Image (cartoon, rainbow, N blue to C red):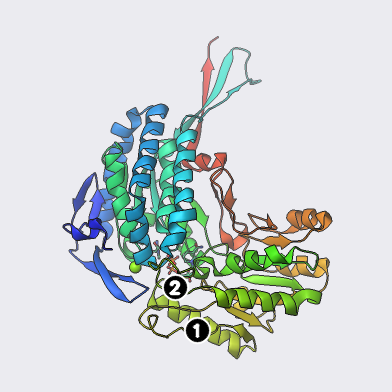
Amino acid sequence: MRPAFLGQAPKQLFIDGKWVQPASGETFETVNPSNGQVIARIAAGGTQDINDAVAAARRAFEGSWSRFTPYERQGVILKLAELIDRDFDELSLLDSMDMGAPLSRLRGPGRKRALGRLRFYAGLATTIIGHTIENSASREMLTYTVREPIGVIGAIIPWNAPLTSALWKIGPALAAGCTVVLKPAEQASLSCLRLAELCMEAGIPAGVVNVVTGLGESAGAALTQHLDVDKIAFTGSHLVGQKIIQASVGNLKRVTLELGGKSPDIVFADADLDKAVPGAAMGVFGNTGQVCCAGTRLFVERSIYDEFIERVANFGNSLVVGDGLDPKTQIGPVVSQEQLDRVLSYIQIGLDEGATTIAGGARLTEEGLSSGYFLPPTIFGNVRDDMRVAREEIFGPVVCAIPFDTIDEVERRANATQFGLGSGVWTRDVTKVHRLAKTIKAGSVWVNCYNVMDPAVPFGGYKLSGYGREGGVEHVDEYLNTKSVWVNYA
Ligand code: NAI
Ligand code: MG
């Protein structure tokens, strides 16, 4: 099942429409987390390669790409969607091998998400409009605004959904008329490299989409510091987000940040529990918990707490954990040895702080799983709000189950976090729905559902979860400047 893409001459960095060697000549391994085996060696891009890619992106921005009309940009984005659809089996195989997500999940909802996004941005390419403004400065002065692409975009993405994350940056950038240097996560670069080839095949000119693989502290940092990059669009941890803001000061480049969370998912006793059990469980265990908006603080009304958590535990225990490529698998491995160690250390921290495991809690090492990085769905009980496991993003299949008594109490505790990305409310009571939809400080509130996404609906954070919105008609605004033109015709 090895994709053809991996069998050809090793693909390195994609700069100005060509495959090039990294200036350093260095490479690093990418590993399949389902079995610990090395899949391929990836080029370790550095400052020189970033400089080359940014220069190519600048030339394309001012040259070939600037001559594309909105309809022509729409045309190539739609063509790219068509090619991704054609090659989705290969792209999803690359992602599944590289970061462990179940192939079945990638090919079902993942495919719909990826293609939907691109087609949505293709539509937006032709909707970019300015205004004419009546001004009081003079009766004989026409004022109008023009929306211009902001220029060269540095896109830095994580490993938890490589292809869809890349499209969430490239789609709006292309719709707006910007050019891109994409720095994939070092754990999962393969589908982004294949995507670069598809961009060329779609008729997107050389230099418009460049892909520089490499480590965060070298390739990533060089991109964020580059004085000719106009904007960084980042998804990842808040600690790196903070570094990016610091690195942006040299040219005050724009920054949008889609960061992590510690999202509350609140279940009231009057909820439809048959829906809430799987909804809350998959809201945190889906993608092995490696989801920025995972509902990791599960608040359950005390009168149903024991029953509800037992049902979530049973549901979690029934999920098939295994190799991403196995069609039966529902939960794949965590992405890397490093991430496994990190999640296990959080489990130990929770136990040391006095929490108890209601389900899971230890690495899975049985037949077929021992060489991969597998963890079972894990539920912590006896959690206090001040524990680290209740405050910090773990990014694994670990949930804190927390009882509550009143809506006032749960409202306060849900918001007592540095983050504000996702949130969930399960109830049949419309009063509770509207009250919490208003008072929860998070970018998304899901009511009687969790982690539903659509390209037309904005997504993003409050507080340490970052700023800027991805998705929605306003997403393209994040890639545009407004120019005001004053014409004195007196
Ligand atoms: P990370 O935030 O370090 O990496 C994300 C991306 O940023 C990668 O492409 C990486 O190469 C790049 N990067 C790292 N350091 C950089 C720097 N100094 N300058 C520019 N780019 C840099 O995330 P990591 O280390 O993979 O995971 C650590 C934790 O971060 C996770 O356990 C999780 O808590 C959180 N995280 C959150 C994500 C989200 O979707 N909100 C995604 C990935 C991680
Ligand atoms: Mg990998």
How far across and how far down the image is residue 447, in percent?
70, 56
Figure disc tally: 2
How far across and how far down the image is residue 342, in percent?
47, 79
In the rendered structure, the answer to whether residue 1 lies left or right of residue 331 reads: left
Asked which secondary structure carries label 1, the reply is helix
> Mark 1 packing: few (<14 Cα in 10 Å), some, or many (20+)?
few
* Residue at 47% in and 55% down: 108
Q: Is residue 404 visible?
A: no
Is 67 in front, or is 104?
A: 104
Is 294 in front, or is 53?
A: 294
- The residue beneath circle 2 is 334
Q: CB at mark 1 closer than 8 A to ligand 1?
A: no
| 150 relative to 411, above or below | above
* Residue at 55% in and 50% down: 468
| 36 relative to 235, above or below | below
Q: Which residue type carries mark 1?
A: Ser
- The residue beneath circle 1 is 345
How far across and how far down the image is residue 403, in percent?
75, 76
Using the image, tell me which numbered label, if any, was put on residue 219. Answer: none
How far across and how far down the image is residue 88, in percent?
36, 51
Q: CA distance from mark 1 to mark 2?
A: 14 Å
> Mark 2 packing: few (<14 Cα in 10 Å), some, or many (20+)?
many
Q: Which residue type carries mark 2?
A: Val
Q: Quadrant of the C terminus?
A: top right
* Residue 178 found in image quarter: top left
Asked which secondary structure carries label 2, the reply is loop
Is 22 in front, or is 136?
A: 22
* Residue at 52% in and 56% down: 258
Q: Is label 1 or label 2 in front?
A: 2
| 74 relative to 454, above or below | above
* Residue 456 found in image quarter: top right
